[in-house]
C-alpha cells in the first residue's frame, strides 16, 4: 500500500487556489443523482452535510444522539481562530499557518495546514452571516482574545460557548436543508460498519438505537465526521457518547489509522474528585490569559492558598518560559503540571492539581471585568468544586481532551479507501503532534464548509460507481458481523460491568500512555491491555437485549473497539522514538524536561493498517514522509 | 468522607406503548461530591450486577451544555437548583435518607422511548421550520460589514444560549414549547442578519410548534425558572410581538 | 403569511387575543366599579348614571354586544387552553413543584381557569339579577327610570347574595393578580424591568378592584342598607 497525500504542486500560497482552479465539477443535474452519507453531525458533519445538500447532492446524516445539535463540538468554550488581523497586530494567513505548524511540533502536512489558515477567515464570515453571536466591541465590530501558542489576538469567541454557537449555526444550516428534503436526517442511529464494494466505500451499517434494528444504507460516498477517541482513557473531557467505533470499524475495513499516539492533554481541567467520577470538565484555556499558574515552593504545604506569601509561590510557567509565560501551548503547560506534581508540589487532597489564580487580574482589572470575561466558567467551577474562584485560586489539572491522530486522509480529506472521506477530529490532518487552542472549531468547519464540498465533486466527477443495492453480499456480510458482535457481547454474561472494564483500561492508558511515556511502561501497557481485553471477552456483563434502547450495549461495543485502539496507541507510542508535541517519551528529553524531537528519523506520519486481532493486535506501519518545503524545522521554544 | 443513603423512586417504562410505573431503589454510599447522573451510574452498576435492566436516561456532555439530560427530579425539571442542568446537579444538595422521585419529562409531544428517555425530535422540526438564517455556504459577506450594536449582540446571545433540553416543556403546566421557540425566534430576529426572514420565520416556527402538539402558554414563567441557562420569557413576548407584526404586514 | 382568521386561532394569536380582551375587560371593570361607587353619591346619583347610560340608545347596545363578544372570546380561549393542556400532557407527574425564582406560578396563575369559569357563571346570574331583574320604576327629573339603587340595596341585604358576591369578587382579584401582568406579556412586553414593575402594578390594581367590589355588598349588608352612614336613600 502506498499512501499518496496528493498534495498539489506549486507554491504554498497557491496550492489550494490551483486545486480549485483545476478541480473537476459535477453538473447540477448530476449532483442530485449522487447520494452521500455523512456520519456524525458535529461541526464538521453538520457543515459538510448542509454545504453538500446546498450544492444539490442527496445527503443522509447519521448521529448517535437524539439531535444533531448535541454533538460534542458544543462543549468547546474558548473560541475559534482566524487570520482576520482585525487587531492590526501583525496577523496573517502565513502567521496562523506558521503558528499551527509550529504548535503541532512539525508533524503535520504543510499544504493542509496552510489551506486551513486560508479558510479561517471565510468561516468567521459564514458564521456571522448565520447569526452566530460573537463577542463584539462597543463599535459593533468583532472582538478578539488571545490564546495559547500565539502572540497575536486572533480568537473570535461567544462568551465561553463558542462551540455551542458555531454548532448551532451549522446545525441550523443543516436543518434548513432537512426542511427542503435534500437531507434525510437519522438521529439515534449508530454506524457499526463501513460497506466496501470492490475496494470502494459504498455504504454503512447502522443500528437504530431505539428499536435495535440493524439497517443497511447505500451511497456513492461516505463522509465520516465522528470526532476523536479521547474516551479510550475513560476519564476525559469528551462527552460520554463520544467514541471511536465508526472510525475504528472503517480502520478494520482497510482505512489506515494515523498517529494514534498523538493525544492532547488539556492543561486546565477540574481535578478528579473520586472513583465514581464519570468524566472531566474542561475550563477554557482562555483562563490562562488572566490566571496565573502556580504551586507552593515547599512540598506538602497545607496552608490555604491565600495564606501563602508571594515569595513562596512558584509561578513555574512564568519562570521557565518568560516570553510566553502562562500562555505556553497546551502540551507544554500539561507536561509542566505533571512535572511539578511529580516533584510533590501538587495541591488539593490528591496532590494532583495546581493553582490557577485570578487574584492579580481581579486586583488589576476589577472583579466585574473578570466576571464579564469568564463569568460562566467561574460559575461552572464553583458549581462543581463548591469553591469560589473569585476568592481563592482554582485547582486545575490536565485531562485528556483532544486526539490529533485519526484516520489517515490525503489532501482531499479522503482516506485510503476511495469514497471514504474523513473530516474534523476524526481525521489526523492538521494538528500534527499538538493542537493549538481555538483550532479545533476552525478545522471542523474548514473541512465541512470549505473543503469536502469541493473535493467530493472532484471524486465523484471521476469515479466509476456502478449501482449497488443493499442486497449486495458486502452489505449482508457487514450487517451480519455487526449483529453477531452484539449477540456475542450479550451472551457472555460475565461478572464485570462494561464501565468497570472501561475504567481499568483508562487507568492503564493514563498511567502508561498518558502525559509522559516510556518504552518500558508502554510495553507493560500493551501486555496489560491484551490481558484485560481477553478478560473483557470472557467476563463482561452486558444487560438487557439488542432489540430495544440499551445504552450499556452501545457502551460495550464501543469499549470493545477501545481495547483494540488502546493497543495501537501504545504500539505507535513505542515506535515513535522521539518526543514531539503531546507525545513525551521519558527517554527523549533534556535534563530540564524539555522534549527532544528527532526530525531526521521521525518526520513522518505513522499510518497503520489493520491486519487482525488474535490475542495481539496485528498491524502494518506505513509511513508518509513529511516534507517541509516552506518552513524551517526548529526546536520549539516558548522560553 | 461521609456518605449518604438515598431512596430513589424511578419511573420505569419499557417502551412508548408500555404503561410504565415507579420502582423503588435504595442506594448506599452516595458521596456528596457525586453529580446526580454519577449517582444514577452507581445505581445502574448495582442493577446490572443484580441482573436487572439499568435505568435508561439521556446524557452526554455532563457539563451542562449539550442539553441531553432533562429528567424531572422531585417534580422539578433538572432538580432543585436554579440555572443548573441535571448533569451539573451534585448530591450535596441532598441529605442522608432523602427520597428522590425521578420522572421523565411528560408531554404528548415528547413520547417516552424508555424509562427517562424521551423523543425530542419535535424541537428539531421547529428549528427546521425556520430557525436559521438562509445563507448558503460561501455566500457570506466579510464579517465586519455587518456591525451589530454590542447590546443587541448581547441580547441575541442571551437567547441563543438555549441548549434545547426541553425542561421548559417539562415544567410548563400546559406543556408549552413557547420558551424554546421564542428563544430561537428572539435570537435570530434581534440580529440584522435575521431581519430579512423575520416574519416568515416567526410564523413558520409558531405554526410548527402548535402542530407538534405542545400546549398553550399561560405566562406561568415556570420555564424561565427551570431553564438551565436562564432564558427569559421576554423571548416569548418578542415572538408574539413579531408574530403580530408579521400578520399585519 | 397566515390569514387573519388563521392567525387569530393560532396558539400565539389566541394568547394575544386573550391579552387584548383581558385589557378591555379590565378597563370595563374599572368603569363598572366607578358606576357602583355612585351608590355612595347623593340619593339619585346611581340611577342618574343608569339613565345616562340608557340615553346612549343604540350606542349602548353596540357597547353591550361588543363587551359580550370580548367576554366570550376571552372565556372561550381560556377554556380551550385549559382543555389543550390535558391533551398536551395526557399523563401527569406524580410529584410536581415550582422552582420558584422568576416563576409566576401562584395560586392566582394556577387558578385562572377555575376563577375564570366561576366568573363566567357569575356573570350569567349577575345579569339576571341586575340587568334583567324586576325593578321598581321611579321618576328622575320627571323621567321614568329603573330604580337600580334600591335593587342593589335590597339584594345585598340578603347574606347569601352579599357574601356570595364578595367571594366571587375575591376570585376576580385572584384572576387579575396574574391576569393583568400576563396580558402585558402576551402583548409583547419584553423589557425585564418593565415586566417586574408591571407584575407589582398588576397586583396592586387587582387588590384595589377586588376591594372596591367587595366593600359595597358587605357595607350594605353590615350597614343595614339605607341605614348605613355613607348611603343616602330617598
Image (tube, coloured by chain):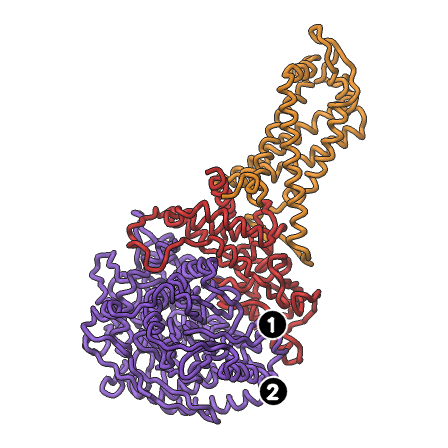
Chain colours: A purple, B red, C orange
- First-in-chain label (1 vs 2): 1
Tag count: 2
Element type where label 2 sits in the image: helix
Q: Nearer the viewer, residue A1 or B83?
A: A1
Report which residue position mark 1 lands on. Answer: A211
Q: Chain of mark 2?
A: A
Q: In this rendering, which labeled residue sits more in front, label 1 or label 2?
A: 1
Residue at the bottom extreme, as displayed = A615
A461 sits left or right of B87 in the view: left
Residue at image x 62%, y 71%?
Answer: B55
Q: Nearer the viewer, residue C56 or B29?
A: C56
Report which residue position mark 2 lands on. Answer: A492
Q: With respect to residue A208, does A368 lie above or below? A: above
Check disc 1: other Cα within 10 Å, few if <14, some if 14-19, many if 20+: some
Q: Are marks 1 and 2 on the same chain?
A: yes
Q: Chain of mark 1?
A: A
Residue B6: image quadrant is: bottom right
Q: With respect to residue B148, does A579 lie above or below? A: below
A309 sits left or right of A385 in the view: left
Residue A167: image quadrant is: bottom left
Residue at the top extreme, as displayed = C142
At which x and y percent is residue B212? 58, 54
Q: CA distance from mark 1 to mark 2?
A: 22 Å
Q: Is residue A325 visible?
A: no
A167 sits left or right of A330 in the view: right
Amino acid at each position: 500500500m502506498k499512501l499518496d497525500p496528493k498534495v498539489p504542486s506549486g507554491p504554498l500560497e497557491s496550492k489550494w487556489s490551483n486545486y480549485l482552479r483545476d478541480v473537476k465539477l459535477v453538473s447540477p443535474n448530476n449532483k442530485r443523482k449522487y447520494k452521500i452519507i455523512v456520519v456524525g453531525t458535529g461541526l464538521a458533519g453538520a457543515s459538510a452535510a448542509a454545504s453538500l445538500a446546498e450544492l444539490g447532492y442527496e445527503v443522509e446524516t447519521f448521529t448517535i444522539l437524539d439531535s444533531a445539535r448535541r454533538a460534542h463540538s458544543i462543549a468547546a468554550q474558548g473560541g475559534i481562530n482566524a487570520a482576520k488581523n482585525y487587531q492590526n497586530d501583525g496577523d496573517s494567513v502565513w502567521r496562523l499557518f506558521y503558528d499551527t505548524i509550529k504548535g503541532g511540533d512539525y508533524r503535520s502536512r504543510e499544504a493542509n495546514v496552510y489551506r486551513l489558515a486560508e479558510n479561517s477567515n471565510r468561516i468567521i464570515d459564514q458564521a456571522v452571516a448565520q447569526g452566530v453571536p460573537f463577542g463584539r466591541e462597543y463599535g459593533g465590530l468583532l472582538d478578539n482574545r488571545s490564546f495559547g501558542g500565539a502572540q497575536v489576538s486572533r480568537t473570535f469567541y461567544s462568551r465561553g460557548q463558542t462551540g455551542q454557537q458555531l454548532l448551532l449555526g451549522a446545525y441550523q444550516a443543516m436543518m434548513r436543508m432537512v426542511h427542503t428534503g435534500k437531507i434525510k436526517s437519522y438521529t439515534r442511529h449508530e454506524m457499526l460498519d463501513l460497506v466496501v464494494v470492490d475496494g470502494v466505500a459504498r455504504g454503512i451499517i447502522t443500528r437504530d438505537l431505539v428499536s435495535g434494528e440493524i439497517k443497511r444504507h447505500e451511497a456513492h460516498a461516505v463522509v465520516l465526521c465522528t470526532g476523536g477517541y479521547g474516551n479510550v482513557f475513560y476519564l476525559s473531557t469528551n462527552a460520554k457518547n463520544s467514541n471511536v467505533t465508526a472510525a475504528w470499524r472503517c480502520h478494520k475495513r482497510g482505512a489506515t489509522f494515523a498517529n494514534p499516539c498523538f493525544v492532547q492533554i488539556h492543561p486546565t481541567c477540574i481535578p478528579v474528585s473520586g472513583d465514581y467520577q464519570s468524566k472531566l470538565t474542561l475550563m477554557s484555556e482562555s483562563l490562562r490569559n488572566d490566571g496565573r499558574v502556580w504551586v507552593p515552593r515547599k512540598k506538602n504545604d497545607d496552608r490555604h492558598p491565600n495564606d501563602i506569601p508571594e515569595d513562596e509561590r512558584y509561578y513555574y510557567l512564568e519562570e521557565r518560559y518568560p516570553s510566553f509565560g502562562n500562555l505556553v501551548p497546551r502540551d507544554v503547560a500539561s507536561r509542566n503540571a505533571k512535572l511539578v506534581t511529580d516533584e510533590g508540589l501538587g495541591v488539593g487532597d490528591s496532590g494532583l492539581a495546581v493553582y490557577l489564580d485570578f487574584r492579580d487580574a481581579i486586583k488589576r482589572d476589577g472583579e466585574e471585568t473578570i466576571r464579564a470575561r469568564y463569568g460562566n466558567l467561574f460559575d461552572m467551577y464553583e458549581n462543581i468544586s463548591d469553591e469560589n474562584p473569585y476568592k481563592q485560586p482554582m485547582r486545575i489539572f490536565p485531562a485528556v481532551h483532544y486526539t490529533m491522530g485519526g484516520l489517515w486522509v490525503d489532501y482531499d480529506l479522503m482516506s485510503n479507501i476511495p469514497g471514504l472521506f474523513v473530516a474534523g477530529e476524526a481525521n489526523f490532518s492538521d494538528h500534527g503532534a499538538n493542537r493549538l487552542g481555538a483550532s479545533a472549531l476552525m478545522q471542523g468547519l474548514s473541512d465541512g464548509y470549505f473543503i469536502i464540498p469541493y473535493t467530493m465533486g472532484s471524486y465523484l466527477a471521476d469515479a466509476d460507481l456502478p449501482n449497488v443495492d443493499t442486497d449486495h453480499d458486502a452489505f449482508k456480510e457487514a450487517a451480519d458481523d455487526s449483529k453477531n458482535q452484539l449477540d456475542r457481547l450479550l451472551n457472555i454474561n460475565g461478572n464485570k460491568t462494561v464501565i468497570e472494564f472501561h475504567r481499568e483500561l483508562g487507568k492503564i492508558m493514563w498511567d502508561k500512555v498518558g502525559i509522559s511515556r516510556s518504552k518500558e511502561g508502554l510495553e507493560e501497557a500493551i501486555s496489560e491491555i491484551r490481558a484485560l481485553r481477553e478478560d473483557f471477552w470472557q467476563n463482561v456483563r452486558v444487560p438487557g437485549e439488542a432489540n430495544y434502547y440499551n445504552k450499556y450495549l452501545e457502551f460495550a461495543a464501543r469499549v470493545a473497539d477501545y481495547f483494540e485502539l488502546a493497543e495501537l496507541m501504545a504500539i505507535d507510542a513505542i515506535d515513535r522514538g522521539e518526543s514531539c508535541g503531546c507525545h513525551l517519551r521519558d527517554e527523549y528529553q533534556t535534563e530540564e524536561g524539555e522534549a527532544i524531537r528527532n526530525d531526521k528519523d521521525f518526520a513522518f506520519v505513522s499510518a497503520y493498517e489493520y491486519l487482525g486481532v488474535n490475542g495481539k493486535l496485528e498491524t502494518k506501519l506505513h509511513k508518509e514522509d513529511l516534507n517541509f518545503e516552506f518552513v524551517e524545522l526548529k526546536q520549539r521554544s516558548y522560553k | 468522607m461521609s456518605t449518604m443513603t438515598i431512596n430513589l423512586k424511578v419511573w420505569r417504562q419499557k417502551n412508548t406503548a408500555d404503561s410504565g410505573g415507579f420502582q423503588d431503589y435504595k442506594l448506599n454510599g452516595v458521596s456528596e461530591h457525586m453529580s446526580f447522573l454519577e449517582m444514577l451510574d452507581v445505581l445502574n452498576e448495582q442493577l446490572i450486577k443484580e441482573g436487572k435492566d439499568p435505568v435508561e436516561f439521556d446524557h452526554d456532555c455532563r457539563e451542562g451544555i449539550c442539553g441531553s439530560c432533562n429528567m424531572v427530579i422531585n417534580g422539578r425539571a433538572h432538580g432543585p437548583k436554579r440555572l443548573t442542568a441535571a448533569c451539573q446537579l451534585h448530591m450535596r444538595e441532598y441529605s442522608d435518607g432523602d427520597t428522590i422521585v425521578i420522572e421523565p419529562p411528560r408531554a404528548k409531544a415528547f413520547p417516552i422511548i424508555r424509562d427517562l428517555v424521551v423523543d425530542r425530535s419535535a424541537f428539531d422540526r421547529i428549528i427546521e421550520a425556520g430557525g436559521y438564517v438562509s445563507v448558503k455556504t460561501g455566500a457570506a459577506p466579510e464579517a465586519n460589514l455587518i456591525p451589530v450594536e454590542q447590546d443587541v449582540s448581547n441580547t441575541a446571545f442571551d437567547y441563543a444560549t438555549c441548549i434545547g433540553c426541553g425542561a421548559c416543556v417539562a415544567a410548563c403546566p400546559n406543556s408549552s414549547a413557547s420558551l424554546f421557540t421564542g428563544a430561537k425566534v428572539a435570537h435570530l430576529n434581534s440580529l440584522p442578519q435575521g431581519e430579512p426572514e423575520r416574519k416568515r420565520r416567526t410564523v413558520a416556527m409558531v405554526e410548527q410548534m402548535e402542530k407538534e402538539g405542545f400546549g398553550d402558554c399561560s405566562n406561568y414563567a415556570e420555564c424561565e425558572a427551570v431553564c438551565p441557562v436562564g432564558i427569559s420569557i421576554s423571548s416569548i413576548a418578542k415572538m408574539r410581538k413579531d408574530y403580530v407584526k408579521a400578520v399585519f404586514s | 403569511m397566515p390569514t387573519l382568521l388563521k392567525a387569530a386561532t393560532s396558539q400565539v394569536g389566541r394568547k394575544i387575543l386573550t391579552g387584548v380582551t383581558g385589557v378591555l375587560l379590565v378597563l370595563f371593570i374599572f368603569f363598572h366599579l366607578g358606576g357602583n361607587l355612585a351608590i355612595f353619591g347623593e340619593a339619585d346619583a346611581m340611577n342618574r348614571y343608569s339613565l345616562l347610560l340608557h340615553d346612549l340608545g343604540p350606542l349602548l347596545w353596540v357597547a353591550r354586544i361588543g363587551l359580550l363578544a370580548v367576554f366570550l372570546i376571552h372565556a372561550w380561549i381560556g377554556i380551550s387552553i385549559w382543555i389543550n393542556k390535558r391533551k398536551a400532557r395526557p399523563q401527569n407527574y406524580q410529584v410536581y413543584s415550582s422552582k420558584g425564582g422568576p416563576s409566576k406560578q401562584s395560586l392566582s396563575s394556577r387558578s385562572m381557569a377555575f376563577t375564570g369559569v366561576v366568573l363566567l357563571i357569575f356573570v350569567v346570574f349577575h345579569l339576571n339579577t341586575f340587568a334583567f331583574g324586576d325593578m321598581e320604576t321611579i321618576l328622575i327629573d320627571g323621567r321614568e327610570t329603573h330604580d337600580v339603587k334600591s335593587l342593589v340595596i335590597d339584594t345585598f341585604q340578603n347574606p347569601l347574595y352579599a357574601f356570595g358576591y364578595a367571594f366571587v369578587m375575591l376570585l376576580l382579584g385572584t384572576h387579575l393578580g396574574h391576569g393583568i401582568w400576563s396580558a402585558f406579556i402576551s402583548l409583547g412586553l419584553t423589557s425585564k424591568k418593565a415586566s417586574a414593575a408591571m407584575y407589582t402594578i398588576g397586583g396592586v390594581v387587582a387588590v384595589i378592584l377586588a376591594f372596591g367590589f367587595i366593600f359595597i355588598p358587605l357595607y350594605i349588608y353590615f350597614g343595614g342598607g339605607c341605614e348605613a352612614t355613607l348611603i343616602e336613600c330617598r
